[in-house]
Image (cartoon, coloured by chain):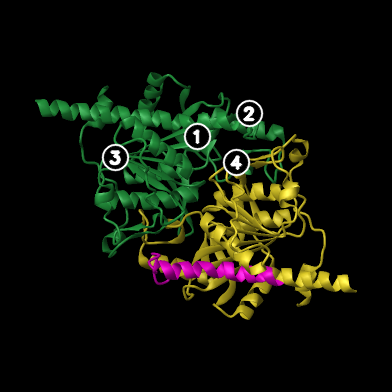
Chain colours: A green, B yellow
Amino acid sequence: MNPEEEKRATPSSSPVFVHNPHLDVMKDDVLYHFALGTATHNLPAMFGDVKFVCVGGSPWRMKSFTEYIAAEIRMEDPESEYPNICAGTDRYAMYKVGPVLSVSHGMGIPSIAIMLHELIKLLHHAHCEDVTIVRIGTSGGIGLEPGTVVVTKKSMDATFLPKFEQVILGKTVERNTDLDQCLAEELLQCSKELNQFETVIGNTMCTLDFYEGQARLDGAFCSYTEKDKQDYLKKASEAGICNIEMESSVFAAMCKLSGLRAAVVCVTLLDRLKGDQMNGSHEVLQSYQLRPQILVGNYIKKLLKAKAGRSCNSATV
Amino acid sequence: MNPEEEKRATPSSSPVFVHNPHLDVMKDDVLYHFALGTATHNLPAMFGDVKFVCVGGSPWRMKSFTEYIAAEIRMEDPESEYPNICAGTDRYAMYKVGPVLSVSHGMGIPSIAIMLHELIKLLHHAHCEDVTIVRIGTSGGIGLEPGTVVVTKKSMDATFLPKFEQVILGKTVERNTDLDQCLAEELLQCSKELNQFETVIGNTMCTLDFYEGQARLDGAFCSYTEKDKQDYLKKASEAGICNIEMESSVFAAMCKLSGLRAAVVCVTLLDRLKGDQMNGSHEVLQSYQLRPQILVGNYIKKLLKAKAGRSCNSATV
């Protein structure tokens, strides 16, 4: 374990911050899109032990991640069923095994932002501390072999600037999209040890649209040429952008504001310089989608093992 | 039947437009987020008869709408099961009964935009004509009794302007968000005939965020006061805005571009001037959510009945 890992494995007390004085005077708090609330659920009892949160677009993938991580960390019977904690709604799905929470967020910035507001409040109400959060997702790569995993250095907008624009009361406020560089390096190191697939650290472009917003030629509308597309993607590449997805900027901005140690780990399903359609075989695309969860699962296992070893050593001293 | 309804019920041949020359030279088209495609599915056979498309955020609601409409239009046994046509993915859910297609779109502009790109291509590939599309959704009202249904006149952004900003190759393009005013009036008339709940026509604000973007005081972050919120909502009200949701602007813009006759019908779950939390009872909120589907279901029934009557008359002449 290197010093950084040691530090992470050491108990400290970094809380999950909300920045909202109005919450203090609210009698209770309904987390509407989770179908949870402070008046109806004992959030500290349900979630107080959470140390890792993994989020991803697809509810199926987040259930599959929970089953995978349960087997990996041997916390519980890998054959057992994990109920959807948000079964009262179909907006998001949520699963928990030991200290690992897994939540779906749908597609796009607004969808993940609603989820993150309620997740941050949930972790706050549950008095969680020292939480690491990772988005595991899919993306389009630029000049990378499909199947390559990208750990995001900076999340950039469609003009290649590392910022997220939040509209508040009709006015645009710029927010920083820095992610935890130590966490990114630890994940890269973890992938090297795993040695199962290529992983790189690079910038990620986050767009509000999948078709015209990402210079695809296969949407219902397209007013530009193949050359325009290639020129745009080339400029993106020159800005250090390795892949394109639709959630990382607001994820980075909100996690930074709330003091969550955050990373974005996305597999590339295709090389956008060579095409736009996701026409790889179902099996190949499925196997690519497993890669972020294998990497993050392994990282969590490593950290929990280190922590258990430390506790064990302390107990024998 | 008034002349406008008569015109709508009369067979014509208004196709669903795509505006993309690249589609013509593609060997096949994978509608990735529907798990459908031109090479794997006979889209004209599956969807060629579609005349109405209803879309809404929640997959459960769209399934429930399909069951409701099946009973209303007596097209099929209301007790029968309607399979999810997009069962190969969990991104969207899609159901069909007779000429009525029902599709979920998740939350927020990016999520509905992906769905609409693929829906418009689907209708185009299936050679559909004279298609009416309605978004049935939920919203926050401004100064309206909760449960009021709002049929959107204009969709406005967070600065109260009737436009949608689409980013293409990093540049912002403004798109018109006009909706079909005749269709809105017909829906209002239909609600009057139904006489089950209050329905109004008004402007709808479409935001990229549910919390800070809608001046809520109960998000994880909030940097403004109750007075700032009230001032902002008052200005919105002065611009004719009756309700706030998160999909109408891109819906209006894309439907207009593709020649789809489009309306947005959203129920208000609360009065934002009086609060931010959705703390109405589950039963009351559920009953409110049924209202847009009752209204649109009734409208579709009326049009199909008029069309059947006309065909019948033609046959006997």
Residues at discs 3 and 2 both on one chain = yes
Q: CA distance from mark 2 to mark 1?
A: 15 Å
Is label 4 on the same chain as label 1? no
Q: Principal SS element in the magenta part?
A: helix
Residue on which the image places disc 3: A99
Dot placed on the residue nearer the N-terminal end, 2 or 1? 1
Label 3: which secondary element: loop
Q: Nearer the viewer, residue A186 or B155?
A: A186
Which residue is pictured at 53% across the width and 56% down the height?
Answer: B57
In the rendered image, the residue lying farthest to the left is A317
N-terminal-most mark, 3 or 2: 3
Q: Residues within 10 Å of mark 2 (few under 14, many from 20)?
A: some
Examine the image and state in which quarter residue B223 appears: bottom left
Q: Is residue B45 left or right of residue A246?
A: right
Residue that carries the numbered disc 1 in the rendered image: A204
Instruction: Report, in whole angstroms, how far the alpha carbon at label 4 lies from the one at label 3.
Output: 40 Å
Q: Nearer the viewer, mark 4 or mark 3?
A: 3
Q: Secondary structure under badge 1?
A: strand
Q: Position of residue B161 (x, y in %)?
A: 58, 62
Residue B272 visible in the current orientation: no
Chain part drawn in magenta: B273-302
B290 inside magenta stretch:
yes
**B46 inside magenta stretch:** no
Chain holding disc 3: A
Question: What secondary structure is found at the residue carrying circle 4?
Answer: loop
Disc 2 to disc 1: CB gap under 8 Å: no
The chain carrying label 2 is A
In the rendered image, which quarter contains the N terminus of chain A? top left
Q: In the visual, does B78 lie left or right of A19? A: right
